[in-house]
Structures are given as C-alpha cells and as structure tokens.
Image (spheres, rainbow, N blue to C red):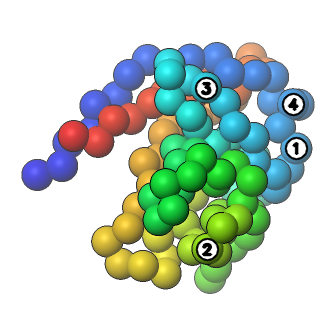
Amino acid sequence: MNHATTLGWVPVCPLDRLQPDRGVAALVDGVQVALFRTADGLFAIDNRDPVSGAYVLSRGIVGSRRGVPTIASPLHKQVYDLRTGHCLDLPGVAVTRHDARCRGGLVEVRLRQEG
C-alpha cells in the first residue's frame, strides 16, 4: 500500500512572482518542484519528468483536458493532471504532487514523499 509522508509548509516566493499559466522551478528542502498558478489555483509537482528523467516540467505547457488543469511535458508531450499528478496519456505513470497554498501573499509548498 502506498502511503504519503507530509512534511511542513515552506515559503517559496511572493504570489505576484508567479505568472498565470506559466511554470516556475523552485528548490524546496532539496527537491526540485514545479509551481503553477492557473485559474484553478496553485499547484506544485515534482519538476522531474518521469518518462525522460529530465527536470523540465516547470517549462511545460499549461492547459486543460475535459475541465482538468494539466501540464504537458515539453519533451515528449505527455499530459499530467495538476491536481493528482497522474499521467492522462500513459496508465500507471505519475509525478509526485505536493500541496501548495498562498498565505499572507506568500506561496508555500508542503512536500509529499511517496513511500
């Protein structure tokens, strides 16, 4: 059974530093995280593309599929659900999703480690 370990909230940047529908990479407690600000909210996922192994998801294309906020990998174009991290194109492939919120004008991330 898969359990997620949740760590504490870490301030990353002011909200106004995140451009809508654009990704940005941040180092949070030694983990490369891709942050996204969309009309659906704030999202954080691992920056590592699980298909290629490259740290590029923050440079992906933000979009939606059937109302689901998504990010498409800039390398092979696999599409991931920003809410869950699941790949919508390849069953069984996923990227780790982290919690993201805005508090007092600061974006905070709480890492989740699958284990």
The answer to which of marks 2 and 3 sits earlier in the sequence is 3
Q: Which residue is mark 1?
A: 19
Q: Nearer the viewer, mark 1 or mark 2?
A: 2
Q: Nearer the viewer, mark 3 or mark 1?
A: 3
Q: Is residue 97 left or right of residue 47?
A: left
Q: Which mark is residue 27?
A: 3
Say which amino acid is labelled 4.
Answer: Arg
Residue at mark 1 to residue at mark 2: CA–CA distance: 24 Å
Q: Residue 1: image x %, image y %?
A: 11, 52
Q: Secondary structure at mark 1?
A: loop
Say which amino acid is labelled 3.
Answer: Leu
Q: Residue 71: image x %, image y %?
A: 65, 63
Residue at mark 4 to residue at mark 1: CA–CA distance: 6 Å
Residue at mark 3 to residue at mark 1: CA–CA distance: 18 Å
The answer to which of marks 3 and 4 sits earlier in the sequence is 4
Categorize mark 2 by other alpha carbons within 10 Å: few (<14), some (14-19), many (20+): few
Query: Can see residue 42?
Result: no
Residue at mark 4 to residue at mark 2: CA–CA distance: 28 Å
Say which amino acid is labelled 1.
Answer: Gln
Q: Nearer the viewer, mark 3 or mark 4?
A: 3
The answer to whether residue 72 is above or below residue 8 is: below
Categorize mark 4 by other alpha carbons within 10 Å: few (<14), some (14-19), many (20+): few
Cβ–Cβ under 8 Å for marks 1 and 2: no
Q: Which mark is residue 76?
A: 2
Q: Residue at x 18, y 49 (%)?
A: 2
Q: Quadrant of the C terminus?
A: top left
